[in-house]
Image (cartoon, rainbow, N blue to C red):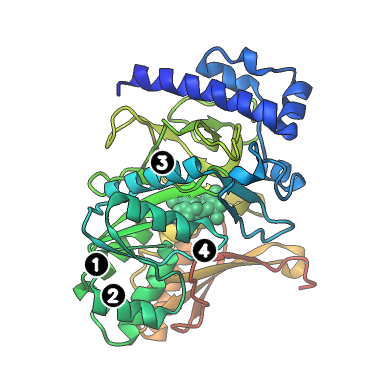
């Protein structure tokens, strides 16, 4: 399909989506009316920017099913986000939505190197989280064989990798690090497994993390992006041959990049801002201009020339740490910490407020084979690197190997202990 043909398809689907939402979801009707826009105003793709955005809070207020645009009998499945604060957000799928989801997911796995006939260990968590079942359907749809392992039970994960000899694994990047680490502790050679491809997502990970994983396991690791509100894993996927950002499946999802402080401002391709998505085919829960809080930029098509890519997510806007006036993201620390050879990739960030001044401590494990003194020297270099490159003074605390809690899914990086009377 040429770009022109794609845009014509997008417009038709967008007009359908906006009308479907307006006619069947009171939340959208109220928002559009309050904003003075109507589905008839959508004559070209650019008209979308006149419509109001949707936030997680909007979905929460319509908990659990009030954002559904079809009668409940047509909803075949629901999922829910974990909702660390407040109510979770609930999402629903018709039979056709599930089929489309499997299709876009299958495209991601294919781009990441998986082929029909391969065995794929699916170590995303099964359940209300979209990762497990989303990847499961995608792998089957592609014609590969899925091992529905789910997250956790690391010993068992390793056993299955050894016994079943899968060519690919799908999980969060930090969980693959957990598995890698556990293999080493068992005295196994992680580079000697059958694994050739990893399809990693659900949390931000830097190029330095990619290098750590690829080097450690001797495989090719590609990114998969998605979010429950838009569909789940499979909104965009990265080519293992290019490894330069994820192709967005623009026949199903329309991306925009907005200024994160002034959402009315849609930014040009190439500029960094907040990703905003509109679904184009979703029946059960159409989503109009959903604010993801994910920071990225749109790049021209490459692995699939007619569809744009998104740069690997740098951070979520709500993960931003403001440290004595300087904005910083966990990924900036990761970029500097992982190349320090004495230190492991297992770290967390702690914010405290002793003496009424914010302080950031990077707690990071030393590599098991490195002596404490050498690790301390590495930590001192990291303090200087952070000062030079980010401009912030932080503390780096060297932790003993295997003392920082390992993730089985999304890793919690930042522990904010300010305001706890410290
Ligand atoms: O995490 C869906 C998913 C599952 C994607 C498995 C990929 C693989 P949620 O739980 O709703 O859905 O969380 C969505 O996770 O807004 C991002 O902040 C983050 N995220 C997802 N994929 C990536 C990625 C799933 N590849 C939120 N890189 C999103 C960085 C990601 N962040």
The answer to which of marks 4 and 2 sits earlier in the sequence is: 2
For the residue pair 417 and 174, the one nearer the viewer reads as 174
Q: Name the mark nearer the viewer: 1 or 3.
A: 1
Q: Earlier in the sequence, mark 1 or mark 2?
A: 2
Is ligand 1 closer than 8 angstroms to the Cβ of mark 4? Answer: yes
Within-10-Å neighbours for mark 2: few <14, some 14–19, many 20+: some
Q: Quadrant of the C terminus?
A: bottom right
Looking at marks 1 and 3 on the same chain, the residue that comes earlier in the sequence is marked by 1
Q: CA distance from mark 1 to mark 3?
A: 26 Å
In this figure, which residue is indicated by the disc labeled 3?
Answer: 311
Q: Secondary structure at mark 1?
A: loop
Mark 2 or mark 3, which has the lower sequence index? 2
Pointer 4 local density, CA inside 10 Å: few below 14, some 14–19, many at least 20: some
The residues tagged by marks 2 and 3 sit, at their Cα atoms, a distance apart of 31 Å
Q: Nearer the viewer, mark 4 or mark 2?
A: 2
Please name which of the two marks, 3 or 4, marks the residue nearer to the observer. Answer: 4
Q: Tags 1 and 2 in contact by the CB under 8 Å rule?
A: yes
| Dot label at residue 154 | none
Task: Kindly check if marks 1 and 3 are in contact, taking CB atoms under 8 A apart as contact.
Answer: no
Residue 91 locus on image (x, y percent): 61, 48
Quadrant in which residue 376 is drawn: bottom left
| Image position of 52 (left or right of 283) | right
Q: Which residue is mark 1?
A: 195
113 up-or-down from 402: above or below: above
Marks 4/1: CA–CA distance: 22 Å
Give the mark nearer the N terminus: 3 vs 4. Answer: 3
Seen from the viewer's position, the closer of residues 375 and 3 is 3
Q: Write down the residue under mark 4.
A: 410
Mark 2 vs mark 3, foreground winner is 2
Residue 31 visible here = yes
Q: Residue at label 2?
A: 161
């Amino acid at each position: 399909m040429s770009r022109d043909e794609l845009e014509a398809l997008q417009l038709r689907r967008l007009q359908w989506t906006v009308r479907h939402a307006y006619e069947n979801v009171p939340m959208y009707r109220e928002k559009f009316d309050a904003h003075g826009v109507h589905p008839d105003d959508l004559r070209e793709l650019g008209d979308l920017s006149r419509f109001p955005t949707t936030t997680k809070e909007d979905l929460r207020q319509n908990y659990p099913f009030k954002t559904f645009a079809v009668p409940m009998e047509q909803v075949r499945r629901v999922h829910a986000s974990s909702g660390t604060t407040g109510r979770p957000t609930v999402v629903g799928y018709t039979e056709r939505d599930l089929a489309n989801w499997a299709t876009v997911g299958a495209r991601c796995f294919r781009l990441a190197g998986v082929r029909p006939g391969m065995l794929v260990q699916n170590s995303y968590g099964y359940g209300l989280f979209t990762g497990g079942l989303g990847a499961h359907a995608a792998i089957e749809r592609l014609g590969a064989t899925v091992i529905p392992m789910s997250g956790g039970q690391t010993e068992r994960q390793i056993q299955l990798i050894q016994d079943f000899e899968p060519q690919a694994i799908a999980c969060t990047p930090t969980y693959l690090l957990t598995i890698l680490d556990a293999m080493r502790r068992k005295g196994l050679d992680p580079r000697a497994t059958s694994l050739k491809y990893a399809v990693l997502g659900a949390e931000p990970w830097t190029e330095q993390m990619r290098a750590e994983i690829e080097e450690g396991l001797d495989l090719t690791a590609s990114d998969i992006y998605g979010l429950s509100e838009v569909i789940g894993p499979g909104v965009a996927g990265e080519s293992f041959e290019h490894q330069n950002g994820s192709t967005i499946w623009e026949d199903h999802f329309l991306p925009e990049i907005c200024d994160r402080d002034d959402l009315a401002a849609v930014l040009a391709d190439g500029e960094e801002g907040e990703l905003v998505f509109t679904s184009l085919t979703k029946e059960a829960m159409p989503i109009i201009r959903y604010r993801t809080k994910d920071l990225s930029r749109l790049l021209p098509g490459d692995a699939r020339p007619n569809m744009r890519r998104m740069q690997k997510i740098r951070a979520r806007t709500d993960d931003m740490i403001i440290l004595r006036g300087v904005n910083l993201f966990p990924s900036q620390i990761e970029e500097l910490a992982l190349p320090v050879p004495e230190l492991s990739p297992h770290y967390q960030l702690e914010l405290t407020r002793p003496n009424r001044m914010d302080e950031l401590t990077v707690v990071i494990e030393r590599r098991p084979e490195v002596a404490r003194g050498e690790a301390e020297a590495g930590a001192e270099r990291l303090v200087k690197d952070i000062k030079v490159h980010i401009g912030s003074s932080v503390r780096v605390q060297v932790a003993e190997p295997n003392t920082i809690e390992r993730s089985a899914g999304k890793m919690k990086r930042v522990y904010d202990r300010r305001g706890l009377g410290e």
